[in-house]
């Protein structure tokens, strides 16, 4: 589903509010989230390193700033209802649309494979291959689509760690942030690191 522009939905009719391009929003958004993140979850040095990493990768989003597709923004196996059908699986419903927006579907791909513990590598590899195979040609997938999705996912990871201490998904997000700050953004080409 396409929209006239990227951004967040303003109402139940899914009109899209105008806003800054994602590439310009990311550094400020992350800085705000890092101020709000509990010290018990992320120490000050990690918060600074994450903000620096996000700022360094934000310019890559220029490549997806104008994509205006329906993005679920919480796409993961827990939000998909499936049924066995003819030796395979059929998607019956996608749940939990509260964070949806108009933007790049690469964000959903990165979200689906965000947490390693949520799905085995075979699932993640199969998902990556199927997602790339079925992308619309007008989205110019190229070889960097997953990297761009990972950079879009920096918004969600940053927001997640602002949740109260003890929130299990926020704690998972904090582990990912620590991993990315130590190892670099997953799926980035060497010249993006």
Image (cartoon, rainbow, N blue to C red):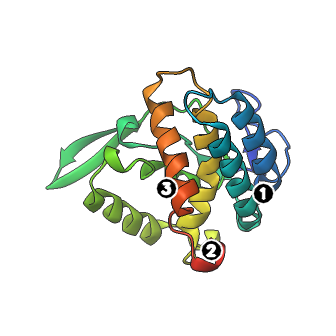
- Dot 2 or dot 1, earlier in sequence: 1
Q: Which mark is residue 140?
A: 2
Q: Of 191 and 125, which appears nearest the observer?
A: 191
Alpha-carbon distance for marks 1 and 3? Answer: 18 Å
Q: Which residue is mark 1?
A: 23
- Residue 189 rendering spot, x and y as whole percentages: 57, 76
Instruction: Tell which circle, 2 or 3, labels the residue nearer the N-terminal end.
Output: 3
Foreground: disc 1 or disc 3: 1
| Front: mark 2 or 1 | 1
Q: Circle 2 — which element? A: loop
- Can you say whether 139 is above or below 34 in the image? below
Secondary element under disc 1, as helix, strand or loop, is helix
Q: Which mark is residue 95?
A: none
Residue 14's place in the image compared with 152, above or below, is above
Closer to us: 147 or 52? 52
Q: Is residue 101 visible?
A: no
- Crowding at label 2, few (<14), some or many (≥20) Cα neighbours within 10 Å? few
Judge whether 37 appears above or below 7 on screen: above
How busy is the neighbourhood of tag 1: few (under 14 within 10 Å), some, or many (20 plus)? many
């Amino acid at each position: 589903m396409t929209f006239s522009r990227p951004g967040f939905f303003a109402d139940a009719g899914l009109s899209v509010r105008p806003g800054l391009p994602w590439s310009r929003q990311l550094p400020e958004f992350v800085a705000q989230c890092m101020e709000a993140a509990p010290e018990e979850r992320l120490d000050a040095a990690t918060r600074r390193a994450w903000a620096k990493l996000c700022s360094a990768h934000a310019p890559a989003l220029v490549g997806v700033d104008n994509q205006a597709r329906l993005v679920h923004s919480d796409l993961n196996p827990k939000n998909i209802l499936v049924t066995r059908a003819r030796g395979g699986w059929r998607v019956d419903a996608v749940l939990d649309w509260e964070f949806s927006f108009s933007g790049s579907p690469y964000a959903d791909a990165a979200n689906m494979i965000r947490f390693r513990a949520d799905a085995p590598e075979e699932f993640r590899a199969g998902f990556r291959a199927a997602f790339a195979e079925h992308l619309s040609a007008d989205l110019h997938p190229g070889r960097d689509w997953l990297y761009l999705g990972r950079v879009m996912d920096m918004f969600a990871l940053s927001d997640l760690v602002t949740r109260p201490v003890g929130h299990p998904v926020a704690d998972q997000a904090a582990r990912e942030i620590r991993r990315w700050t130590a190892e670099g953004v997953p799926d980035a080409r060497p010249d993006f690191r």
